[in-house]
Image: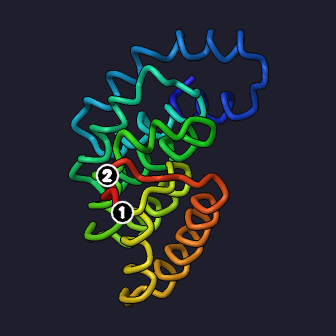
Amino acid sequence: MDLAEVAARAADLTDERELADLRAASDEEIEQAVRGPDFRIRAMGYRAIGPLRFRQKVELLRRGLEDESPACRGAALISLELLSRDQPGDVNAVRPMLHTLANSDPNGTVRRLAVMCLKNGSPSRDSIVLLEHIAEAEDDRDLRAVADRIAAVLRKRASQTHYRDPRARQR
């Protein structure tokens, strides 16, 4: 079974034991894939991490966010978004990288995916300000729309939880 089939099978699994077995069976294959020279194989490796809910591979996703290939960066972002849905710490750990990708990646799809990942993190003021800026100043209409929608979600979450950014100045 190749990594695309593994990812598809993992997405359908609800039994944690079966998922753990599938993770164990594909561990080495993922490691080899993300270290390979072919960007298509690397992207497939990064893409498989999310559906497998492979938290031990979050550091590999960080490497994927820095990959030269937009396909690899996009695949890593998709997996990060999946993993971070129930654990915002995954996004919070790479927030500066996500800000850089959302603000200045040369690939529009990568930028939109980075914005989507920010939705799953803590509602930090710097993320909200960046998203508001993107929503106002970007030429890409789709990116503006996504950034505006995610900024609204984070503002609402911040107001509901009375989240206080620890870096904010005390008055």
Protein image colouring: rainbow
Residue at the image point whose x is 27% and y is 41% from the top: 38
Residue 59, how many percent across, how many down? 33, 29
Res 90 quadrant in image? top left
Q: Residue furthest front?
A: 171
Q: Is residue 110 left or right of residue 84?
A: left
From the image, tell me which residue sits under label 2. 167
Nearer to me, 65 or 68: 65
Tell me the SS state at disc 1. Answer: helix
Residue 153, how many percent across, how many down? 61, 65
Q: Amino acid at mark 1?
A: Asp
Q: Amino acid at mark 2?
A: Arg
Q: Is residue 103 left or right of residue 74?
A: left
Look at the picture and state if 34 lies above or below 32: below
Circle 1 crowding by C-alpha within 10 Å: few under 14, some 14–19, many from 20: some
Q: What's the mark number on residue 126?
A: 1
